[in-house]
Image: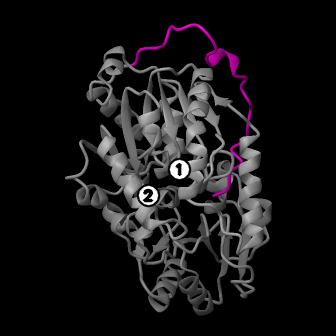
């Protein structure tokens, strides 16, 4: 461990420098799911994403929306959203220039928030690359790097700066957690210790939703069948709009339903058989998936996708609907239960075949139940303890976990 004195004392909680914003993003993300479950064992302070760049003013509506979202997040302070699980949005300015302005105040904010959560000797978990400087500014028992996204391939970020930050975090980390085995293999010589944890799934919720013969929530129940659905962020660095539009033209007999936040330009999709529903609460996502006849993943060929392990794959499979996807490395052991097709003609043909052929998902349930987030969190906790880390609750007096009121919140983040 990097801090021998603290290691001997043990840790009394986890500070997670997250890659998303709890109040806005899909609650299915890896760091949300892991931290919620670790908080059943140890106190967790989840620090909402610090951001990797200042949003561009070129698209005024997007700029205003993102800045407004950040202000709303900041206004909440430290919130206990579940027992042992605290969420905090510090004041920070994204980008190289912004970090020079705000970094001097960032660590003190987080340390104060951690004390309110009863954490004084943290295990520091870093997902967002912008959190790199906190490794030297916050005393810690150990460092875990979450390498589940290839941030340096994020099109809105600075790949050189992000690459440097990622390398610094990896060098400082006692453990690097991967969700894509091939990325772990690529980086095996640059990490002190690795743990591969593919994404999990809320198995019970999605399997149960899939068994219900329903037209779905009211905002999609009126849509004619057959329905072809995509549930997730509709963003250019992941979703391939050209491929999608090509498939829509080739399968006019189907209604295409998109559930999720969309960052593509307005009027990007002119087709009347496409229904863009928008972002919906995470707890309702299983019902939307189950209301589809075929579920699709029309990914582009970006470096981001090449390194990803999409959470929705196991969610799609759990609801028991046929899945059509473009090819990506992390499909791995699931290739036998999905249709893989690249290019508009092949993808459209796969969708048509999936709509025509009877689909039996009964044999998948056992495989899916072995992939729950609870199983993944137990494996992670065991790995941390196997490293020699030990939990030692702080007995120091002063403000702590008891003085943060719990806020009952709906999981009202979009997919």
- 272 up-or-down from 86: above or below: below
- Secondary structure under tag 2 reads loop
Q: Which mark, residue 363?
A: none
Side (left or right) of 254 relative to 35: right
Quadrant of residue 247 in the image? bottom right
Residue drawn at (45%, 57%) of the image: 362
Name the residue beneath numbered marker 2: 149
Q: Is residue 238 visible?
A: yes
Task: Compare residues 355 and 343 and report the one nearer the observer.
Answer: 343
Residue topped by disc 1: 19
Residue range (magenta) = 391-415
Above-or-below relation of 27 to 374: below
Is residue 408 found inside the magenta-colored segment of the image? yes
Residue 374 forms part of the magenta stretch: no
Indicate the quadrant containing the C terminus: top left, top right, bottom left or bottom right: bottom right
Residue 135: x and y, percent? 42, 37
* Neighbours of disc 1 within 10 Å: few (<14), some (14-19), many (20+): many
CA separation in Å, label 2 and label 1: 9 Å
Q: Is residue 242 above or below residue 80?
A: below
Q: Main secondary structure of the magenta part?
A: loop
Q: Position of residue 308 (x, y in %)?
A: 41, 62
Q: Secondary structure at mark 1?
A: loop
Residues under numbered marks 2 and 1 in contact, where contact means CB atoms less than 8 Å apart? yes
Task: Decide which of 5, 392 is in the foreground and name it.
Answer: 5
Depth check, front residue: 328 or 272: 328
Q: Residue at x 71, y 34 (%)?
A: 77
Left/right of residue 304 with respect to residue 72 in the rendered view: left
């Amino acid at each position: 461990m990097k801090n021998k004195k603290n290691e001997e004392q043990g840790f009394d909680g986890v500070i997670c420098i997250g890659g998303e914003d709890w109040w806005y993003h899909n609650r299915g993300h890896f760091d949300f799911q892991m931290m919620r479950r670790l908080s059943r064992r140890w106190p967790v302070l989840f620090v909402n994403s610090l951001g990797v760049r200042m949003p561009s003013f070129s698209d005024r509506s997007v700029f205003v929306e993102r800045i407004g979202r950040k202000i709303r997040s900041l206004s909440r302070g430290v919130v206990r959203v579940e027992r042992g699980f605290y969420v905090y949005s510090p004041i920070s300015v994204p980008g190289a220039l912004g970090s020079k302005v705000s970094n001097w105040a960032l660590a003190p904010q987080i340390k104060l928030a951690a004390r309110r959560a009863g954490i004084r000797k943290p295990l520091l978990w870093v997902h967002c690359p912008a959190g790199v400087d906190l490794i030297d500014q916050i005393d810690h028992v150990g460092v875990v790097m979450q390498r589940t996204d290839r941030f340096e391939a994020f099109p809105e970020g600075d790949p050189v700066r992000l690459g440097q930050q990622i390398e610094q975090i990896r060098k400082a980390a006692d453990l690097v957690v991967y969700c894509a085995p091939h990325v772990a293999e690529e980086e095996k010589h640059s990490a002190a210790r690795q743990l591969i944890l593919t994404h999990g799934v809320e198995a019970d919720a999605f399997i149960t939703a899939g068994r219900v013969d329903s037209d779905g929530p009211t905002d999609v129940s009126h849509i004619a069948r057959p329905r072809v659905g995509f549930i997730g962020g509709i963003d250019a660095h992941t979703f391939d709009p050209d491929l999608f539009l090509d498939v829509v033209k080739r399968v006019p007999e189907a209604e295409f339903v998109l559930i999720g936040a969309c960052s593509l330009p307005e009027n990007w999709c002119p087709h009347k058989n496409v229904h863009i529903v928008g972002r919906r609460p995470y707890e309702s996502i299983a019902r939307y998936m189950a209301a589809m006849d075929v579920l699709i993943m029309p990914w582009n060929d970006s470096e981001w996708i090449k390194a990803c392990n999409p959470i929705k794959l196991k969610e799609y499979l759990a609801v028991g609907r046929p899945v059509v996807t473009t090819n990506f490395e992390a499909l791995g052991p699931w290739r036998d239960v999905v249709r893989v097709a690249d290019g508009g003609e092949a993808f459209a043909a796969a969708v048509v075949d999936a709509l025509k052929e009877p689909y039996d998902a009964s044999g998948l349930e056992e495989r899916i139940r072995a992939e729950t987030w609870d199983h993944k969190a137990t494996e992670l906790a065991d790995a941390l303890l196997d490293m020699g880390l030990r939990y030692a609750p702080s007995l120091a007096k002063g403000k702590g976990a008891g003085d943060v009121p719990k806020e009952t919140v709906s999981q009202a983040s979009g997919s």
